[in-house]
Amino acid sequence: MMRLKWILVILCLLALSPSLVGLVFSLIVNPIVSAELRNNPNGEEAREAMLLTFEDRTLPVNYLKEGNKVYIGVDGRWWRAFAGKGIPVSMLIIGETYKGFGELAPDDPIYIKNVFSRLRPTTPDWLPSWLHAQLVVINLDST
């Protein structure tokens, strides 16, 4: 019973503090997922998530690769790194390293909705717009 009480307390704290959620992801969740993607590049996790490196940060993110483009949905504030002229990135996708240039998607709601319908097909339509992820488009280098 005491364990359940502490679990409820922790869940409430996480719900009340977005920065605490970010800390939990940074310290616990992201390192576990990153290790899985590196150590098991042919595993189930690697079919949906990749490692994205930009500005000396490496994060596991879900992705959609179509031709010479990779799409990612950014739920945190780090989407701002891609604002303006965009930035160079590298990616580990199913054990292969790619380089490219990432920038925010054009301000075209139809285009964004179309890509997200393939990237995150199970996202509910009733979510308020302020909870929607930012779409980043990465153009792969031709080399």
Image: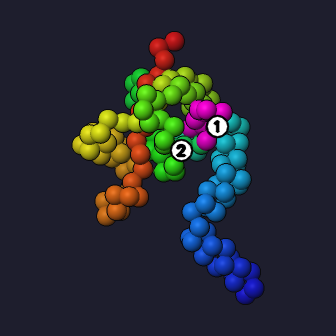
Pointer 2 or 1: first along the chain:
1
Q: Is residue 43 or residue 73 the one in the foreground? A: 73
For the point 40% across and 42% down, the residue is 135
The magenta segment is 50-59
* Residue of label 2: 78
Residue 65 on the magenta segment: no
Q: Is residue 35 or residue 138 the one in the foreground? A: 138
Q: What is the CA distance from the residue labelled 2 to the residue labelled 1?
A: 10 Å
Instruction: Tell me where residue 15 sits by quadrant.
Output: bottom right
Q: Is residue 38 or residue 137 the one in the foreground? A: 137
Amino acid residing under circle 1: Arg
Outermost residue toward the bottom in this view: 1
Instruction: Tell me where residue 123 sits by quadrant.
Output: bottom left
Within-10-Å neighbours for mark 2: few <14, some 14–19, many 20+: few
Within-10-Å neighbours for mark 1: few <14, some 14–19, many 20+: few
Residue 129 horizontal/vertical position (percent): 34, 57
Magenta stretch: helix, strand or loop mostly: strand
In the figure, 113 relative to 54: above or below?
below
In the figure, 90 relative to 124: above or below?
above
Q: What element does badge 1 sit on?
A: strand
Residue 54 horizontal/vertical position (percent): 59, 32
Task: Answer yes or no: is residue 64 visible.
Answer: no
Quadrant containing the N terminus is bottom right
Amino acid residing under circle 2: Trp
In the figure, 120 relative to 1: above or below?
above
Residue 83 horizontal/vertical position (percent): 44, 36
* Residue of label 1: 57
Q: What element does badge 2 sit on?
A: helix
Residue 131 horizontal/vertical position (percent): 41, 58
For the point 71% across and 37% down, the residue is 39
For the point 66% across and 57% down, the residue is 23
Q: How is the image coloured?
A: rainbow
